[in-house]
Image (tube, helix red, strand yellow):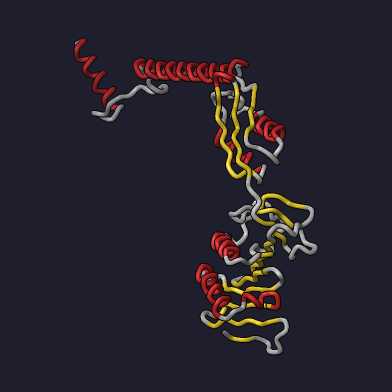
Amino acid sequence: MWRNRRTTRTNSRSARTGGGATFTRSGGPLPKSKVASRRRKLRALIAATILVVFVSIVGFFSWVSFLSALTVTRIDVQGVEDIHEQAVQLALLRNTEKPLAWLFSRQNVLLYPRAELERSIAYAFPKIDTIRIESQPTRQAVQVTIRERNTYAQWCDSEGVSGTCYLLDRGGFIFEEIPTTSTSTLLITGGVSESRTNFLRTRVAPEHFADVTTFISELESLGLTVRSFAFQHDEARVYIEPGWELKVALEDDLGIIAFNLAAVLDTHHLRAALDDMLYIDMRFGERVYHKLKSSIADNEAL
């Protein structure tokens, strides 16, 4: 009788739940796995430990970088003549006073940013041709070796009459402004974009300048004194003592032009007439034109 009642109760409960349906207790999410929780806590602990160690290492090296025993106390500058040694030293101090990433001293003799400073100092002083910075940890010193640019010619943006003039080296690099022109120094004009307003650190006609310096040397080897050289787009005017002009095309081989000029002067006996020469025009290949100041004709072909 008792067993029948339990069977009946079970059947009635099954009927309420829909026969063979599975019963699930409702009341929120299942408890988290203890293993997964432990893993997460372990990962967090490892990450925190790594972070603390990393910060400690960075802090230690930051502290070491500012030690007075590793700080540059002496800057030796060699090779300067026109550039003031104190100006270079001051520029180096100014460029290293701000710590790297606010953590590491740039004035540390072991961390001295030599390559970066070489670029910045060379830009600050255009007269510098080459610069080399070397750290000397045992002396807490830095040695700066500089080679200054040598003046090859003076460059003016307006024929040197009223325009601004500069000095340039043999590579055509403009490195210094000058107050007045000098008649004893070769004058070069043109070869720079007319839209420019600042000519410092500019290279004059970089595609032609090396050939031009060689050409001028070859003219001087012929006994001619070049007073000035004017770039005019794809042509040039060379002014030669005692006051005549040589016209050339820059697209031609200037070495061949110098050779042909020597032949013209000797073959046609023009050397004796150079004092009376107005111009020699060699822009037209094998045809060479010249004009004498005393000549009636406009020009004569050779």
Q: 20 above or below 8?
A: below
As drawn, the residue found furthest toward the top would be 2
In the image: residue 250, left or right of residue 199:
left
Q: 173 above or below 195?
A: above
Quadrant of image for the N terminus = top left
Q: 69 above or below 234?
A: above
**Quadrant position of residue 269:** bottom right
Frontmost residue, 37 versus 30 = 37
Which residue lies at the image location 67% right of the left edge and 56% below the top edge?
153
In the image: residue 221, left or right of residue 228:
left
Frontmost residue, 225 versus 267 = 267
Q: Position of residue 246 (x, y in %)?
A: 63, 73
Q: Position of residue 199 (x, y in %)?
A: 69, 55
Q: Position of residue 227 (x, y in %)?
A: 69, 64
Q: Position of residue 226 (x, y in %)?
A: 65, 65
Q: Is residue 208 visible?
A: no
**Quadrant position of residue 168:** bottom right
Which residue lies at the image location 63% right of the left edge and 39% below the top edge?
121
Q: Is residue 258 visible?
A: yes
Which residue lies at the image location 59% right of the left edge and 35% below the top edge?
145
In the image: residue 95, left or right of residue 115:
right
As drawn, the residue found furthest toward the bottom would be 297
- Count of numbered marks: 0
Q: 45 above or below 219?
A: above
Which residue lies at the image location 69% right of the left edge and 61% below the top edge?
187
Quadrant of image for the C terminus = bottom right
